Image: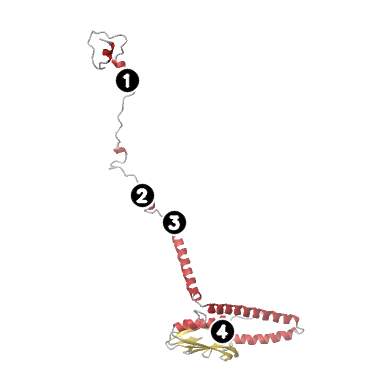
């Protein structure tokens, strides 16, 4: 048998016993492939996962979650602590208060936003007049101080100023009659819709406009005057008055009348209640309703 015929036989084919192998031919078990397999370790099959070590019965494997699903799972249900709840309540209260304040400011300024240009000019003029009145009052007090400081007979000058001041305080206190330019405000309320608070608003508006003496249906209005509803009428300091309500007011007519006619003011408010309001200017208004001089029970002059 030739050398080529020997190598072409399969490695698993047994050779006849007693037949010597040629010295130069390698044995079938010593081929390079068989030697490589002997050097590698035997394959070990992978161990099956032990379900008993992973929490017992687990069932099917959990499907993998997307990023959005993981985010939603982390946010809900919410995990709120007591401190976070308190902070949330405080922030809600603060936001609610700010909303109410903004709504209140919007309501108070709505009348001015809808006002005409001439009405806005008149309101600005009224504010300027109030400022001018305060400046004049300040200047008058400074002049009195200067006269006292420069007068040769300071005692006589002080007495004159005291008498004049007493008259002024008597007018404000309602203990003496007064006359001067001003307006007459008449309110016809046939439906009985004008209440005490509306008349009080009128008094406050007149005072802010520089009214120095006010009389309502024969009752003198002073610093401590109060108004209450009483059936079909109104009580002023306990004295019942009925419509028409007539205000006699001493002051500068150019300031008093515009103060009542501003947008959203006294006249407009009462006309919405179906009352008829008229304002008449006059060069001479007489306020002759008097209040008795009342001695205070506890207050005393600090100069005594």
Corner quadrant of residue 171: bottom right
Pointer 3 or 1: first along the chain: 1
For label 4, the residue is: 256
Residue at (55%, 84%) from the top-left corner?
Answer: 257
Circle nearer the viewer, 2 or 1: 1
Circle nearer the viewer, 4 or 1: 1
Calculate the distance from the C-alpha at mark 3 to the C-alpha at mark 2.
25 Å
Circle 2 Cα neighbour tier, 10 Å, few/some/many (<14 / 14–19 / ≥20): few
Calculate the distance from the C-alpha at mark 2 to the C-alpha at mark 4.
71 Å
For label 2, the residue is: 69
Calculate the distance from the C-alpha at mark 2 to the C-alpha at mark 1.
54 Å
Element under label 3? helix
Pointer 2 or 4: first along the chain: 2
Mark yes or no: residue 197 visible.
Answer: no
Calculate the distance from the C-alpha at mark 4 to the C-alpha at mark 1.
122 Å
Pointer 4 or 1: first along the chain: 1
The location of residue 87, given as percent across then percent down, is 45, 58
Q: Is residue 223 above or below residue 70?
A: below
Residue at (28%, 14%) from the top-left corner?
Answer: 7
């Amino acid at each position: 048998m030739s050398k080529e015929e020997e190598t072409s036989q399969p490695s698993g084919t047994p050779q006849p016993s007693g037949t010597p192998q040629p010295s130069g031919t390698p044995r079938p078990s010593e081929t390079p492939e068989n030697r490589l397999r002997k050097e590698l370790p035997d394959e070990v099959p992978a161990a099956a996962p032990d379900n008993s070590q992973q929490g017992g019965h687990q069932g099917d494997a959990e499907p993998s979650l997307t990023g959005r699903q993981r985010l939603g799972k982390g946010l809900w249900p919410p995990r709120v602590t007591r401190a976070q709840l308190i902070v949330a309540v405080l922030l809600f209260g603060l936001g609610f208060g700010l909303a109410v304040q903004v709504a209140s400011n919007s309501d108070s300024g709505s009348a001015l936003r809808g006002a005409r240009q001439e009405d806005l000019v008149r309101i600005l003029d009224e504010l300027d007049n109030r400022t001018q009145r305060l400046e004049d009052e300040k200047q008058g007090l400074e002049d009195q101080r200067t006269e006292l400081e420069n007068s040769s007979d300071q005692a006589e000058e002080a007495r004159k100023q005291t008498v004049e001041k007493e008259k002024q305080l008597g007018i404000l206190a309602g203990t003496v009659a007064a006359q001067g330019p001003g307006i007459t405000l008449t309110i016809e309320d046939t439906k009985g819709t004008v209440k005490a608070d509306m008349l009080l608003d009128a008094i406050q508006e007149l005072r802010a406009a520089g009214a120095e003496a006010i009389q309502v249906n024969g009752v003198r209005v002073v610093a401590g005057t109060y108004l209450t509803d009483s059936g079909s009428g109104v009580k002023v300091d306990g004295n019942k008055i009925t419509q028409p309500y007539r205000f006699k007011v001493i002051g500068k007519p150019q300031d008093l009348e515009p103060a009542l006619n501003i947008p959203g003011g006294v006249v407009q408010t009462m006309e919405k209640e179906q009352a008829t309001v008229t304002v008449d200017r006059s060069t001479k208004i007489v306020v002759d309703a008097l209040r008795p001089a009342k001695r205070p029970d506890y207050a005393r002059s600090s100069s005594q």
